[in-house]
Image (cartoon, helix red, strand yellow):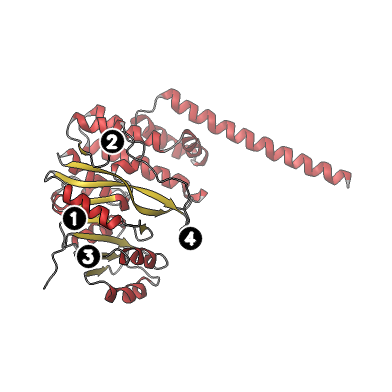
Amino acid sequence: MTNVIALSICIPTYRMGAFLPKLLDSILTQLEDDVEICISNNGSDDDTDLVIGRYATRFRNWRYFRWPQNMGIDLNIEKSVELATGPWCWLMGSDDVIAPNSLRLVKERLQSATPDCDIILANRRKISVDAHPIESEDEQWFPSYADGDIVSLRGSLSGDYYSRSPSLGCVFSYLSTIVLRKSAWMAAEGFRRFQGNQYMHTARLVAIVEGGSRLMICKHTIVHCRYCAIPLDRTLDRLLVDFRGFHEIGEALVPDPTNRKLLWSILVREHPFRSFIRLRELATDDQWKEIRRLLRSLCFSRWRILGIVVGARWVRVRSRYYLIKHHIKMKLRGLVV
């Protein structure tokens, strides 16, 4: 007899052959017959295909698709959901692992979801590349809400939610804490313009909640996020992905100007002031002109932007001071010898 699927775990992957086994093992230890695995492989050229071959027979409900080439993360996420046959989809990064007992917890939340609740959003815990905890406590993205609260973001209520959100994870930036109703995902409109900016899935979910669907808060940690520091040469690009992506989402999908500003205010809470100073340090003068225009449109005051510029100059002066000091010290040591 064919099982009725209650939950599809949707895994877009690309060159994650080294980490995918850990994720699949974490699912296997909790697996139930009404859960299926849906993997979309973005044309990986590592050993991902070998991993898929080893695990395909270990799962009763297994759906797999392989692109002939890398189509970008946005289309790969979309394909992983298209593969799903269940009514609910748990989006999952292929280098993460699900937390102990989280599969049972997610299924309990599905049973308590009201008909107009189309998204469940949960917490995460950061782990190192070798799976050791980075922080002593799990991240807490929903300090203003109780576990199980079902929140409306329609109209002015979205501004209230955005103003209480300490992290971009509260607005769907992080894949593996999102569980969604597939029918709402497939029916969403107004997000295609975001393809290629790495936040098309975020735009799609913002469109869903701004359109009237409600969101359930799960304050439990359901996933362990493999986290590593961004290399210096990628810091500028990473920050710009956030700023450009959420600026575009706000302009296109949040019609109320006040709510839009409150959405953008999450960027300030997500990134400490030193991140903006780092942004100015790394940017060329031409890049900074674009960034300054972007920050102004994100409601940064001229005084705040001036503070960023002054802070960056101070960092440069201080760095040069210590460099000169070190150089003089080395010269004096040479004279003594």
Q: Residues within 10 Å of mark 4 (few under 14, many from 20)?
A: few
**Mark 3 neighbour class, 10 Å CA radius: few under 14, some 14 to 19, many 20 or more:** many
User: Relative to residue 218, is residue 84 drawn left or right?
Assistant: left
Using residue 225 as the reference point, say whether residue 278 is left or right of it: right
Task: Tell me what residue is drawn at x 22 percent, y 35 percent.
Answer: 254
Q: Residues within 10 Å of mark 1 (few under 14, many from 20)?
A: many
Q: Relative to 27, say whether 277 is above or below.
A: above
Residue beneath disc 4: 130
The residue wearing badge 3 is 36
Circle 2 Cα neighbour tier, 10 Å, few/some/many (<14 / 14–19 / ≥20): some
Q: Nearer the viewer, residue 22 or 187?
A: 22
Sooner in the amino-acid sequence: mark 3 or mark 1? 3
Amino acid bearing label 1: Trp
Give the labeled residue for mark 2.
145
Q: Horizontal placement of 322 versus 111: left or right?
A: right
Which of marks 1 and 2 precedes in the sequence? 1
Quadrant showing the N terminus: bottom left
Q: Residue at x 33, y 31 (%)?
A: 297
Say what secondary structure mark 4 lies in: loop
Query: What whole-number distance in Å separates the C-alpha atoms at marks 2 and 3?
Result: 31 Å
Q: CA distance from mark 3 to mark 1?
A: 11 Å
Q: Give the residue pinned by disc 1.
A: 88
Circles 3, 1 touching at the beta carbon (< 8 Å): no
Q: Can you tell which of label 2 and label 1 is closer to the viewer?
A: 2
Front tag of 4 and 2:
2
Q: Secondary structure at mark 3?
A: strand
Disc nearer the start of the sequence (2/3) = 3
Amino acid type shown at disc 2? Tyr
